[in-house]
Amino acid sequence: MFASASEFDPVYYGHDGVRTFWRTWFSAWEKASFEYEEFIDAGDNVVTILSQHVRGRASGIELDWKSYGQIRLRPGRLALRIESDTSPMAVDVLTWEDSERLRVGETVFHTLAPDKVMHRASPEDGEFAVFKARSLIETYAALIAEHQPERILELGIATGGSTVLLAELARPAKLVAIDRKPLDEVRARVGAHADSRGFSEVIRTFGGVDQADRSQIARIVEEEFGGHTPDLVIDDCSHLYEPTRASFNELFPRLRPGGAYLIEDWTWAHNPLDSEYPEGVWPDEVPLTRLFFEIELAIPSIPGLIASISIDDQTAVIMRGEAEIDPKDFEIASCANRRGRSLLAPP
């Protein structure tokens, strides 16, 4: 279907070289069309999103895909152009002005150092606070660049900065964000920014939603995603075992195969052993760690449900497998045999 690799030269030089490359490429197709969807200001670079539609000359098979470009301009000339099938909007799209201030394009974000969490200053108009460490923000940028999610569900949005950051990084088709708090003021700020950036139809925020309310979350997902499955779920909400597990039970089966489910801030019950409070905080709560043990036990017990789980000191990322699972009455704590469940103390 494609022109084979042997038909291409390793390098093409000059205008004649460019013409030769395109003649070789077009020889595989009976029909080919291109349309640029977006040009994104990324500081010193411009990121381009190009939609392509082709029909194979011999096979007649039609294909659609997106390619991503990164263009760097210098006065009077093009300094760099990179094309790939993977979005270049990763860590290099984050312009750090100092350790707590960054830009994505023209949008300014403020991070928050751990010792300042209890003293949250309101950002200036047009700027947004993101209560995440620099390393975590860069993890998000890399994850989004790798998986290119088109439909994102965010649980817990604080002042809305994380929602705007996700929208700017991913440029998804739909981003739905919920929080237990009323979000009137947050919705107004996020909505005003979305209007100014041309994605007012993309972001939807819902306040007064308990992440443990499975029926309400199910209704929001079904109505907002219109029968499509989310590609990425981010849980930065209660950080407690029971409500986090309830959300996982409802949403993980609905996640697209190959999609990612990310849970933040799980280490609150595990301080360094030589610290003043090695048992962490919330001594009467079941550690969120239990949920990850249950997820690991489900990997061999329900083949194909969970492709992988990776954990660091900030997040756990659970990748959805190919198995079809009905979200109705799904319970991750039951996805293990008696021997596996015996490894866990009663909650």
Image: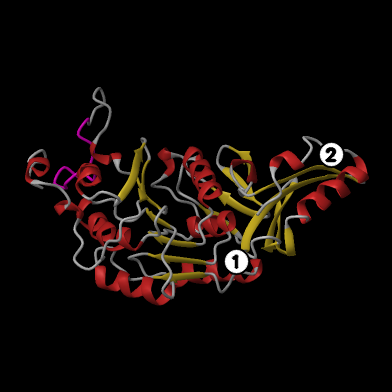
The residue stretch that appears in magenta: 278-288
Which residue is under mark 1?
A: 193
Q: Position of residue 35 (x, y in %)?
A: 73, 65
In terms of secondary structure, what is the magenta stretch mainly?
loop
Q: Position of residue 295 (x, y in %)?
A: 24, 46
Looking at the image, which is closer to me, 215 or 150?
150
Q: Answer whether residue 33 is visible to the viewer in this image.
A: no
Residue 278 placement, left or right of 91: left
Q: Position of residue 258 (x, y in %)?
A: 42, 52
Q: Answer whether residue 63 is visible to the viewer in this image.
A: yes
- On residue 12, which mark appears? 2
Residue 332 placement, left or right of 10: left
Residue 161 placement, left or right of 271: right
Residue in the image at 71% along x and 61% along y: 57
Using a 10 Å C-alpha cutoff, classify the residue at mark 1 as few (fewer than 14 neighbours), some (14 to 19) or many (20 or more).
Answer: some
Q: Amino acid at mark 1?
A: His
Whether the magenta-drawn stretch holds residue 283 is answered as yes
Looking at the image, which is closer to me, 114 or 345?
345
Using a 10 Å C-alpha cutoff, classify the residue at mark 2 as few (fewer than 14 neighbours), some (14 to 19) or many (20 or more).
Answer: few
274 lies above or below 133: above
The quarter holding residue 55 reads: bottom right
Q: Secondary structure at mark 2?
A: loop
Looking at the image, which is closer to me, 280 or 209?
209
Q: Position of residue 227 (x, y in %)?
A: 41, 74
The reply to whether dot 2 and dot 1 touch (C-beta < 8 Å) is: no
Whether the magenta-drawn stretch holds residue 91 is answered as no
What separation in Å lies between label 2 and label 1 (alpha carbons)? 43 Å
Q: Amino acid at mark 2?
A: Tyr
66 lies above or below 8: below
